[in-house]
Image (cartoon, rainbow, N blue to C red):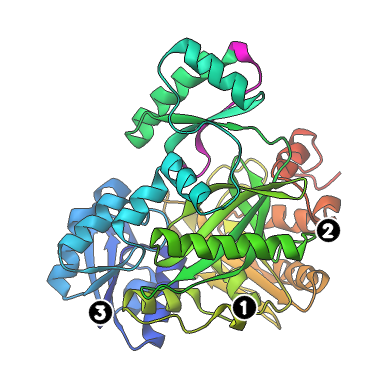
Amino acid sequence: MFDTVLIANRGEIALRILRACRDLGLKTVAVHSDVDADLRHVALADQSICIGPASSSASYLNGAEIVLAAQLTGAGAIHPGYGFLSENADFAASVEAAGLTFIGPPSAAIRRMGDKIAAKRAMMEAGVPCVPGSDGVVPADGNAIRDLGAQVGFPLMVKAAGGGGGRGMRVVRNPDELLEAVATTREEAGRAFRNPDVYMERFLARPRHIEIQVLADQHGSAVWLGERDCSMQRRHQKIIEEAPAPGLDRGVVERVGELCAGACRTIGYTGAGTFEFLYEDGAFFFIEMNTRVQVEHPVTELVTGLDIVREQIQIAQGKPLSLRQADVVLRGHAIECRVNAEHPFTFTPAPGRVERWTPPGGPGIRVESHLYSGYVVPPHYDSLVAKLLSHGATRDEAVARMAGALSEIETAGLVTNVPLHRLLLNEAGFVAGGFDIHHLERLIAGGLIHEGGER
């Protein structure tokens, strides 16, 4: 058991973790870079300590400095949030070696699921449906690569074993492109992930992105908390998420959800996690597992009534799950819009001073943000500045409430992508639901979504 948690992150997720700790009666330590000294969670934490300059490599990615900060402040646990070191197995291992609690899965589980080939093999053994592809690493011999490509079938994808977040992937549409694609992806993977291994998967032309949230404790219990649809994305970066996913066969979803919970028990996974799938023609295909809390976890919280971060912390304390699968009931519909400090139609980051920030309110509206009037959004980190959520008895009600909330937001001195969200909520494909992951990019490429409005 621990009574103090060091929050190894920044922004809205750091504030979210702090509030969960406060609800549990736990003390908090905020670490921050020198440009983040004025963040809200830093002011609210019981202790705070600067761990380096603005560059994330010298601060939020400096694992040794973060562990030292925990030791100096008496924190017994470290919560990594998402991004930064949250899925870094070496960092989790260093926390364990220091005698501290890593609020997340064991380092061995992070390492296993971080290797996409090992993760896919583990899921196949657990019965979770996977995208057809190579059984292991792509060989070095050119002829063997060609033979493997013919077995998988074209078009296919060459993917980095250590990749994630849309990086380390290349579509190959015919055999003539295969050898060059493998060589290029290997080189990029070695530089980006320090692991040059690649594998192949069948390319799905128009899939949806569906994910299933799980919780698993240290006593062999695991539950799944419904599914989320994260198909509204650009270059593999999610923009709008919702729960539950519209138009899916509930029987199929429940079977896959049970397989995910069973996989957690099989591989000894503990904590919060997310199984990510591509969904096409009524079938689910596993692509990866995120071994952390995700940006979009609040949409699941809204339809289940659970506090996922609180559960995550209690699991790390060794407590059993507070619920069984029969207790998980989905109520209504929830939508999340990611509000980024960026130009809404060029997607260029737009850091700057917030002269005025007036968040929306009303029934079924939730805002998670670290913004305040006078805050300066720095250029050094991810551009996410707020998560705007709506909940309603039906999808139509959730959409209507989100539209109202987007009309209420007021920001002065800061450029955000709110105008894009306003257009998307009225776009025919979004209103209908069930669109694929390329939907937004097709709208942009066709000039249907642009600065002058939807056409």
Q: Are marks 2 and 3 in contact (CB under 8 Å)?
A: no
The residue that disc 1 covers is: 304
Residue 431, disc: 2
Question: What is the quadrant of residue 421 in the picture?
Answer: bottom right
Q: Position of residue 117 (x, y in %)?
A: 44, 39
The residue that disc 3 covers is: 4
- Disc 1 marks a residue whose amino acid type is Thr
Q: Residue at x 68, y 50 (%)?
A: 231
Q: Is residue 166 magenta?
A: yes
Q: Earlier in the sequence, mark 1 or mark 2?
A: 1
Q: Residue at x 57, y 77 (%)?
A: 325
Q: CA distance from mark 2 to mark 3?
A: 45 Å
Q: Residue at x 76, y 72 (%)?
A: 398
Secondary structure beneath dot 2 equals helix
- The magenta region covers 164-176
Q: Residues within 10 Å of mark 3 (few under 14, many from 20)?
A: many
- Disc 2 marks a residue whose amino acid type is Val
Task: Name the residue nearer the viewer: 141 or 375.
Answer: 141
Q: Position of residue 283 (x, y in %)?
A: 71, 49
Q: Earlier in the sequence, mark 1 or mark 3?
A: 3
- Disc 3 marks a residue whose amino acid type is Thr
The C terminus appears in which quarter of the rendering?
top right
- Most extreme residue toward the left is 72
Image depth: mark 1 or mark 3 in front: 1
